[in-house]
Amino acid sequence: MSKAISGFNGLAVPGPTNMPFALHRAMDVALEDHRAPDFPEFTLPLLADLKRIFRLSAGQVFVFPSSGTGGWESAIANTLSPGDRVLASVFGQFSHLWVDLCRRFGLEVDAIDVPWGEGVPLDLYEQKLRADKAHRIKAVLACHNETATGVTSDIAGVRKVLDATGHPAQLMVDGVSSIGCIEFRMDAWGVDLAVCGSQKGFMLPTGLAIVGVSEKALAARKTAKLPRCFFDFDDMIRANRDGYFPYTPATTLLRGLRASIDMLEAEGLEEIFARHHRLAGGVRRAVEAWGLALCARHPRWYSDTVSAVVVPDGFDANAVIKTAYYAYNLSLGAGLSKVAGKVFRIGHLGYLNEIMVLAALAGAEMAMLDCGIAIEAGAGVGAAVEHYSRTAKRPVSTKAA
Amino acid sequence: MSKAISGFNGLAVPGPTNMPFALHRAMDVALEDHRAPDFPEFTLPLLADLKRIFRLSAGQVFVFPSSGTGGWESAIANTLSPGDRVLASVFGQFSHLWVDLCRRFGLEVDAIDVPWGEGVPLDLYEQKLRADKAHRIKAVLACHNETATGVTSDIAGVRKVLDATGHPAQLMVDGVSSIGCIEFRMDAWGVDLAVCGSQKGFMLPTGLAIVGVSEKALAARKTAKLPRCFFDFDDMIRANRDGYFPYTPATTLLRGLRASIDMLEAEGLEEIFARHHRLAGGVRRAVEAWGLALCARHPRWYSDTVSAVVVPDGFDANAVIKTAYYAYNLSLGAGLSKVAGKVFRIGHLGYLNEIMVLAALAGAEMAMLDCGIAIEAGAGVGAAVEHYSRTAKRPVSTKAA
Amino acid sequence: MSKAISGFNGLAVPGPTNMPFALHRAMDVALEDHRAPDFPEFTLPLLADLKRIFRLSAGQVFVFPSSGTGGWESAIANTLSPGDRVLASVFGQFSHLWVDLCRRFGLEVDAIDVPWGEGVPLDLYEQKLRADKAHRIKAVLACHNETATGVTSDIAGVRKVLDATGHPAQLMVDGVSSIGCIEFRMDAWGVDLAVCGSQKGFMLPTGLAIVGVSEKALAARKTAKLPRCFFDFDDMIRANRDGYFPYTPATTLLRGLRASIDMLEAEGLEEIFARHHRLAGGVRRAVEAWGLALCARHPRWYSDTVSAVVVPDGFDANAVIKTAYYAYNLSLGAGLSKVAGKVFRIGHLGYLNEIMVLAALAGAEMAMLDCGIAIEAGAGVGAAVEHYSRTAKRPVSTKAA
Amino acid sequence: MSKAISGFNGLAVPGPTNMPFALHRAMDVALEDHRAPDFPEFTLPLLADLKRIFRLSAGQVFVFPSSGTGGWESAIANTLSPGDRVLASVFGQFSHLWVDLCRRFGLEVDAIDVPWGEGVPLDLYEQKLRADKAHRIKAVLACHNETATGVTSDIAGVRKVLDATGHPAQLMVDGVSSIGCIEFRMDAWGVDLAVCGSQKGFMLPTGLAIVGVSEKALAARKTAKLPRCFFDFDDMIRANRDGYFPYTPATTLLRGLRASIDMLEAEGLEEIFARHHRLAGGVRRAVEAWGLALCARHPRWYSDTVSAVVVPDGFDANAVIKTAYYAYNLSLGAGLSKVAGKVFRIGHLGYLNEIMVLAALAGAEMAMLDCGIAIEAGAGVGAAVEHYSRTAKRPVSTKAA
């Protein structure tokens, strides 16, 4: 079985996202000397501007040639010591993996199991934190947007719980599939460590871990005993101060990152959040019109960057995904771990507009029909078309002059 | 009014077509010396292989750094003399323009006016040719695919008429929006001059006129008195023989053309024709489901590369086009000349698959809804989705294991 | 014999020139609709800005998807009629070819033969013009920079001769390898038609003829009887007025042209001319240090964009060129026609700096040594190194702090 | 002070190296789903083919989205435990940094200080290993090519020492600036861990750590207690087995890596090594002709990938580097740490040919002259020109026919 060879591939996974041509171009550069005398003229503003995307005023944003997983590792390795207690919750593959990483580094993780389809359990967090009179919990982990299930959690709520309980633990957030797509505020929410990658909201190839660090978290590195070198904040701080890096940086991706930040700010973060919400609304209306359910169990969990669609009993979601891929050049996201074969995921984040979403919905319709799932052809796309037309911002006058 | 800034632009005009990434890459080369000693190792096979795309065994294919219009000019300038009679028919903007060009070069054109929405009138051609006992008509012009109206004409039929009447006129065909997309056969149909451009079936940027010339047409240059230099076949023959060009060729596009031919042959011309027919079928079902009509007046004229959709009375097709463009990043083709404001055109040619067509249909739906045209949201897309699902080649087994 | 496969190719031919990465990127765009409603927002400033490069205030610059040869054709076809007299001079392959083109279009050309290595003979022009009391000469042709011999002619001088003789003929200039590289002034020099291509000073791929036309030349189209369509100024004027084109333009190259103009103006035309002069100076010192002669017979003819180097008697310049190409990945320009085998040409125009020129000189040294030409290794490069070091603009303080 | 804006930048640092256009193109791809059903068809051969570059038959090559430093970290984290003893030697910035990394991870490093300009001291290694009767030393580190000083060490010699002493320690080699450039043989030399990055011999952007691991080293992970997650071999083995990765891989760079391996094998590793040796020979002759010395103290240490040139007393090497950069668009490598200001480095590795090296030498000459260093203009370039001409492989017949 091989793919059709004509036509663009539709990329509707929840990351990597679609890369704008402008970013292709920004990265299509000759390789360059990262010790050049004018290199800091490029890097210093870049690192400063990143803070605006994280909505971080003090503190620092680090860029490692790595991935989101590396970002997670840098967050704990620079702030915690073996045996430190960590509070976390698991409700999908990615919240699970971060907990696993913590354990491998010798942290003692209190990981609350939550049904997949829900998010961070604020009540249980509050309970645990209130119970921790001795403040043995050094860090609270929260996955802002669980990419595996299409669930967004309430990070401001976690901060409120920490404040309400007067708990000094650091708040560490996995913002891999949220930052640059949906509202995220390090300052306002008191987030101490926020982890992102280049391949989601930044619309770039995989290859950068981008980690926002508050002043409080920066201070924690002085007592943190976990070993670190590649991911060491200290080396990075020392070298970044002059616009350089402790080892060869991924300059090509940094050039892309410059253009990415410029694109994000040209559109405007608030406008980007609104766009993601509107586009996601179309997908949710389509799912409803198909008569199917989302993995996310309640509208308050609905993610504006990814929707996990549950296929009817007796059908294999992977067959839908394979059909979409091989017959229609469309990449849908697979269900992972507990929901493997039960859901297919539609990523709707990053560089995206109505017709791209509609192409994905139409592709999903064809694949479901091919697999025998009894949906009405055009029902989902039609619901989304109607939603987009009704909520479109730029009406053009319509009648013949 | 400005365009939305996120997401890829949908390109659903009937040329330029969507350029595959592979062709972007093939053209992203350093500039090179077109007199290099090994340049012929690249050009000689290229020029030979082009003949396979034209289905031309004898004769020659020329490549000028120009456009389709230049190709038309080369065809007449190398084969005709001032005052020569030409038989033609006009049923759209492009068949009109070629006639206009002929007149500017001092040819005496007998141009039959045909209702827009129909194609080459075989019966009238036969009549005119039969009447031309003295064989004063030196060339018969036929627009294979009228891009302005979405009408495909029967070129094999024109050949039959020429044969039936025993008329020796050269058969010159505008294949700009047909070659490489729908069936075209120089040898079998006795076409003497066939004109194409790089930006349609070849999926490249505009910039090459590609002209297939039969041996009979090549011979005609010896007596042809129209002036020519840039478009001179003789110079080209002499230089091409050794793999060079009479002046600096558009090497970058030639590198793209090499990759284009390879892609066309990797998919296979017959498969390409079938794909265009199937994709066009979806568009036609969508138009029907919208309750709208095509400009093409009868299925025998339906083009597999472009559909001109007539908007209901009282609506302005240009408002639909502008809405699609500004609100939804989708380029639809405008109505030209006689049908301006009355039709919008959906190009469905070149590098294309189901989800790309469906994105265009969905975009057209949103734009029509925004403009107040009473279609049912999803009806057109749904009809196409059903058509594609029903006719898909590669079923994947469907039930959960 | 095949080329070495590692390392960049050195391109030291007099066009195509080296393309900046920035222009690669500017052209690496998705194809677009040239009838889009906002297309004029791109094209109108582009066409206006081109006039600054030509130093043309009134009149118009046209851009055809073509090459320099097409530009020549457009110049005469729009301004002259069959049988018109033209004054010209021939001193190299390119001045020869334009004359040939004129003759093919039925013009009566008085072409003065000049030794190759010299340029436009002002005295003979004056003589001929003065003798033409009846003003039967309608156009005077001058090749500003003869690319075949590395000779620059005095266009301001031709204007003086026309003024001195009070002759109303149009002044048509081949500026293909001069515009954007060395001083060129349409207004100040009273040039009526100036022809350029995209692949020299504009640093782009071949594919655009760029033609500057004075108001006087524009007026001439009303009486000009040569046939034209693809190259018609009238159609272009009508369409360009609204920012469109009479047929599909080479949009990708136009995007490149936008970036090219921006680059030219960012550096500054005067600075560009000075740079070309300084770089050419290094080449000339190298040739002298090799003990070889230029084809240009006197410093007043020396071209700042190309040097044709005469190899010693008994040696084959083509062997040098082939050696440079196959053994050292360096493209040198071949001698054409009368000077074939006698000279190799070093192009030093466009996107260029000292180390690129020095690489070409070093490559030429290796190739000459391999071919047995008795030069001293390093002599030429050393002379150029010294010239560049001595004339460098940006000294950096030198001693250890 | 700002850089000249015309002309390509010369990149003569010892990494990143010059990226071939073919690799630019290979990486200019749309982003893709790294969980696509046919992704393994791409990755499995890629990972297998990498072993040929490392000359590794058993074992495995891992690819992390990281840099060389990350590669070092992966090597120790997967094979050693806190408190393990390591034997190493320090004779430049990079051999120093690896030792520093080991110490941060709690290893007990016996690091022999060697004068910068020399390499791994086989005699001292032998002494230390022989003395370690208890085999407390678990790993022996060796920097194959010290990029800071231009010194190549004898890795086969280290193996001989290990064998002679019957010591079971793992042999870990930093091959960052050697693999893919100069001879490197994991099997033959009994190397257990070899670390490389994408930006040197592989000619790609920075962003991949490429780590070759012998079966013995793979086995060591079962007892190794250092914490690891991002760099965990186990996760990688499990996921790689099916052609996938434990987290989002840097797919774009992997596409480049595919093309890189193909280029390396098309040229042939032996031919590549010979080319590096020949090109380096030209640089060394130039340094000699300038009357300057290399940092490497003896020909047996001379590196074929980088030369560190000592400037005369009283001159600042950084002024030479800045002048080359700002005045001549040429990036030379700076002296690091102990040799800062005393040397400039010429990288001569990766995608490279004669004229590229000569451009760098000519640029260095101009910069030195500008800085007042008394060299003879052209002397160095001339010596290299002569060397290359004399040793060229492809003579073309020379005399006029």
Image (cartoon, coloured by chain):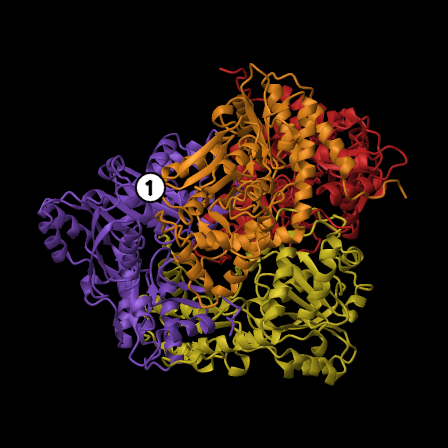
Chain colours: A yellow, B purple, C orange, D red
Q: Give percent across and percent down for residue A393.
A: 49, 79
Q: Give percent across and percent down for residue D203.
A: 61, 42
Q: Give percent across and percent down for residue D388.
A: 65, 24
**Residue C254, above or below C200:** below
In the structure shown, which secondary structural element does the residue marked by tag 1 occupy? loop
Which residue occupies 80% across, 39% down?
D320
Residue extending furthest toward the front: C133
Tell me which corner region of the image, top left, top right, bottom left or bottom right, holds residue B134: top left
Which residue occupies 11% across, 53% down?
B126
Whether residue C243 is visible here, answered yes or no, is: no
**Residue D69, above or below A58:** above
- The subunit carrying tag 1 is B
**Residue B126, above or below C181:** below
Q: Give percent across and percent down for residue D103.
A: 79, 49
Amino acid type, label 1: Pro
The residue under label 1 is B227
Tell me which corner region of the image, top left, top right, bottom left or bottom right, holds residue B211: top left
Query: For the residue carrying disc 1, how many other residues have a C-alpha within 10 Å: few (<14), some (14-19), or many (20+)?
Result: many
